[in-house]
Image (cartoon, rainbow, N blue to C red):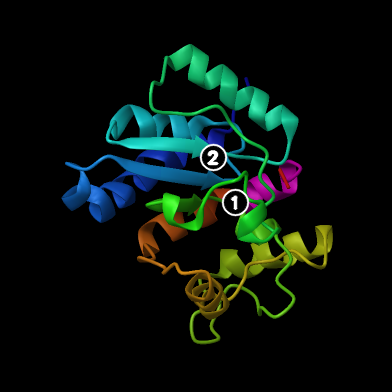
Amino acid sequence: MLLSPAAERSQDSLLSVLWEILEDQSHHELFGLELGSGTGQHVVHFAQEMPFVTWQPSDIKEESRNSIRAYIGATKAKTVLEPVYLDASEPWEKWAGLPQSSCDIIIAINLLQYSAFSTAEPYAINGTITPICNEQLDQTLRQMNPEWGLPDIDVLRQLAFSNGMRMERMSRSVLNMVCDASVTSAKASKPRN
């Protein structure tokens, strides 16, 4: 079982944001896809606290999928499916056979900065990168791989819209909290994608 201290620190704040978005739908059964599930800590935590969502974890690394299986087994999470190989850079049609209309929720935590966005500027809102740690994180990631970096929010909105999705909301508090942990973890560990 893999362990990420950053995932441990961020899971409650991320869960709080999910609850804000999904609270009115908690009387429905929902299907959630997590892209780049990594260790599996987030998806299992979400499943334990949101039993109305069936979660489909995914990752391109076998080591991560094994860790997810271990977390599912250790926690006896009943609403987390077997992890699947899914390369989020591929077209939707290749996403583990999931029909586009099957997902009520799609989350990508600490994944997009490890993706190639050739049309994207660094993570920015109206062209401005904030806070300073995002600039540092972007520089660190681009040094590791020039195709990586923090994508522009407008590019992400356009990609979502062209695929029949929408960005529900951005949470500044979660972004800042994750940002505080990300610069250190990006330098200290290898990315999962």
**Residue 7 within the segment the image draws in magenta:** no
Is 179 situated above or below 12? Answer: below
Amino acid found under the numbered disc labelled 1: Ser
- Indicate the quadrant containing the N terminus: top left, top right, bottom left or bottom right: top right
Query: Disc 2 designates what residue?
Result: 6
Amino acid found under the numbered disc labelled 2: Ala
Q: Secondary structure at mark 1?
A: helix
Is 91 situated above or below 43? Answer: below
**Residue 186 within the segment the image draws in magenta:** yes
Q: Nearer the viewer, residue 42 or 91?
A: 91
Could you tell me if the residues under marks 2 and 1 are in contact, i.e. CB atoms within 8 Å? yes
Label of residue 182 in the image: 1
Q: Secondary structure at mark 2?
A: helix
What distance separates the C-alpha of mark 2 from that of mark 1?
A: 8 Å
Residue that lies at the very extreme toward the bottom in this rendered image: 126
Seen in the image, is 144 located left or right of residue 34?
A: right
Seen in the image, is 28 located left or right of residue 90?
A: left
Q: Main secondary structure of the magenta part?
A: helix
Q: Nearer the viewer, residue 95 or 117?
A: 95
- Chain part drawn in magenta: 182-191
Q: x and y percent of residue 105 in the render?
A: 40, 51
Q: Residue at x 82, y 63 (%)?
A: 143
Is 32 situated above or below 150? Answer: above
Crowding around mark 2 (Cα neighbors within 10 Å: few <14, some 14 to 19, many 20+) is: some
Residue 48 found in image quarter? top left
Crowding around mark 1 (Cα neighbors within 10 Å: few <14, some 14 to 19, many 20+) is: some
Is 129 situated above or below 109? Answer: below
Q: x and y percent of residue 20 in the render?
A: 24, 53
Q: Nearer the viewer, residue 170 or 91?
A: 91
Q: Residue at x 45, y 28 (%)?
A: 80
